[in-house]
Amino acid sequence: MRRASQPCFRSARLGDPRVAAVFVALWSVTLIVVMASIGTFSTPFFHFGPAPALKLFDYAIDSWTRWSAVAVYIVVNQALQTYGLETISPWMLNQVENRSVREITETRAQTLNVVFVWYFWLWLSRIISIQLLLSQIDFLLLILLVDVGCTLLITDRIYLKSKLTGVSNVIDL
């Protein structure tokens, strides 16, 4: 009989982020295999580079100059979005929206301005992002690469910088 303070072996494993990452990776591979088996990758969405059919708000992205301009927008926009999601959103959650925090360093006006600017920009960015995400796979992959790269950089340089990692593994996989 196990004690109440000891977690069940199965539930402890399911709560491990490494186990969750394995499940997510396996599901991702499964989705790609299923998509390939039904011929999804032969549709115009999976074209790379400029094309007469590639449109952004009904504007043809049919030259490398136009395609490159959209690519530059994606890199800058996604880097800013990831940076904001990794800094502004946690600040709002942990400082502003946390009812147990009684004092913050920003003034009321500064706080409201940051919240307004962040949400205004998020929605403006989402309108454009929806068009880009649904247009062509190369734009989607570029968004993914910038997002993952920025997230890893921020996680490593800001959050993990002052932490000692790999200290104790409760569950060895």
Image (tube, grey):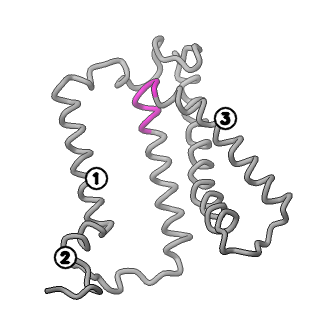
Residue at the disc numbered 1:
24
Residue at the disc numbered 3:
124
Specify whether 64 is left or right of 123.
left
Q: Compute the Cα span from label 3 to label 2.
A: 46 Å
Magenta region: which residues? 134-141
Q: Compute the Cα span from label 1 to label 2.
A: 21 Å
Secondary structure state at the residue bearing disc 2 = helix
Nearer-the-camera pick, 50 or 3: 3
Q: Are marks 1 and 2 in contact (CB under 8 Å)?
A: no
Q: Is residue 54 above or below residue 24?
A: above
Q: Are marks 3 and 2 in contact (CB under 8 Å)?
A: no
Give residue 45's quadrant in the image: top left
Instruction: Inspect the image, locate mark 3, and give the three-letter code of the amino acid beneath it.
Output: Leu
Q: Residues within 10 Å of mark 3 (few under 14, many from 20)?
A: few
Instruction: Inspect the image, locate mark 2, and give the three-letter code of the amino acid beneath it.
Output: Phe
Give me the residue at 13% from left, 86% from top: 1
Give me the residue at 66% from left, 35% from top: 124
Specify whether 68 is left or right of 96.
left
Residue 123 inside the magenta-drawn segment: no
Residue 155 spot, x, y in % from top left = 50, 66
Give residue 169's quadrant in the image: bottom left
Specify whether 94 is left or right of 105.
left
Give me the residue at 56% from left, 37% from top: 74
Nearer-the-camera pick, 109 or 158: 109
Residue at the disc numbered 2:
9
